[in-house]
Image: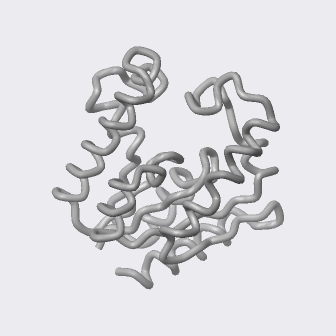
Amino acid sequence: MIVALTGFMASGKSYFGRKAARRCGLKFADLDLEMAERSGYGSVNALVAREGMETFRTFETEVLAQLLETEKDMVLSLGGGTVLSPANREMLKRKVRIIWLDTDLEIIMQRMNPAIRPVAAGKSREELEALYAERRPVYESCADAVLHIGAEDETDETVQRLAALIRSFI
């Protein structure tokens, strides 16, 4: 079974996902890193800068489909916008279990580096808050489980809780 992690950028999908996958003895993949490697650009920023957001989103769907066809038991960190595509949501719903990392916005804002996040580049705090509010219902609608991550949560506890959710699906 593939367990996919969704959530806003800087919500901890890659960080906690990698640690929880290791704890569960599962392979881990990061969709953004897969795209960066397969595109030859080395980063999603470079891919977006050279090809544009529309091409980026099309490529994202292609790489996601390939991963879902070739991989089995693993944890997959999705990009923050992956589930915005109805086609991606449908593909994911048929093939994986989805955990939404519902991370407090304050934590996200502390972690976020707009320089490495093409969707955040040049946006004000208010614009990012609006984007966060707009995406939350989409994350919620496609989630099979939700892991809330608050400011008081310790890293190891969060990894343990995520690993327990992953195990519940495998």
Q: Quadrant of the C terminus?
A: bottom left
**Horizontal and vertical percent position of residue 127:** 75, 36
**Horizontal and vertical percent position of residue 20:** 49, 66
Which residue is at 55% across, 72% downward?
162
Q: Is residue 121 above or below residue 86?
A: above
Which residue is at 69% across, 49% downward?
132
Disc tally is 0
Return the residue nearer the eye: 58 or 161. Answer: 58
Q: Residue furthest bottom?
A: 168
Q: Is residue 61 above or below residue 28?
A: above
Q: Residue furthest top?
A: 50
Position of 132 compared to 57: left or right? right
Look at the image and name its color scheme: one colour
Which residue is at 28% across, 27% downward?
39
Which residue is at 39% across, 38% downward?
33
**Horizontal and vertical percent position of residue 6:** 51, 58
Q: Is residue 142 above or below residue 108?
A: below
Position of 112 compared to 159: left or right? right
Q: Quadrant of the N terminus?
A: bottom left
**Horizontal and vertical percent position of residue 148:** 68, 69
Position of 76 compared to 128: left or right? left
Image quadrant assignment for residue 72: bottom left
